[in-house]
Image (cartoon, rainbow, N blue to C red):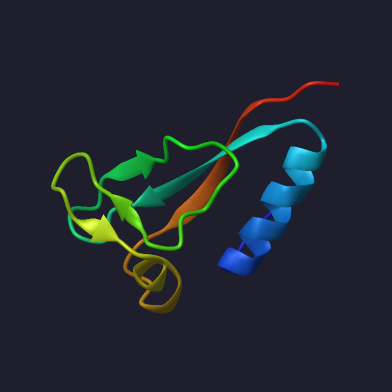
Amino acid sequence: MNITSLGEIIAQMNELIARGAECYFKFTCASCGVRQTSETPNAIHLHGYKCEECGNITTLNDIELNGSAGFMLVARKETE
């Protein structure tokens, strides 16, 4: 599935959680380009994410509006 907006990724996350998945938000740092994965499952932080490599805060504005960073979901565990 090609997800093009944060609204779509939130909808997909909610669907996966309802099916028992544990989801993590994965993003690309807007400053250094390193891929990062959030530590908190089943949440998207509105204030942004700190890069472990360069310390930059990548905000949802960077991700969705400026296009300077990418994003995806990682489902790490699913139960029946």
Looking at the image, which is closer to me, 63 or 42? 42
Q: Is residue 2 visible?
A: no
Look at the image and tell me in which quarter the C terminus lies: top right
Q: Position of residue 34 (x, y in %)?
A: 26, 45
* Residue 70 x, y percent position in the rendering: 41, 58
In the picture, measured across the screen, residue 79 lies left or right of residue 26, that is right
Left or right, residue 5 beside residue 78: left
- In the image, what residue occupies the spot 13% across and 47% down? 54
Q: Residue 24 in the image: x percent, y percent?
A: 53, 39
Q: Quadrant of residue 10?
A: bottom right
Residue 36 visible in rendering: yes
- Which residue is painted at 73% across and 50% down in the image? 14
The residue under the point 42% across, 35% down is 39
Residue at far right of view: 80
Q: Is residue 49 left or right of residue 75?
A: left
**In the image, residue 18 above or below residue 1:** above
**Would you identify the image quadrant in which residue 60 lies?**
bottom left
Vertical position of residue 61 compared to residue 57: above or below: below
Q: Is residue 2 above or below residue 23?
A: below
Percent across and percent down for residue 26 are: 45, 45
Residue that protrudes farthest toward the bottom in the picture: 65
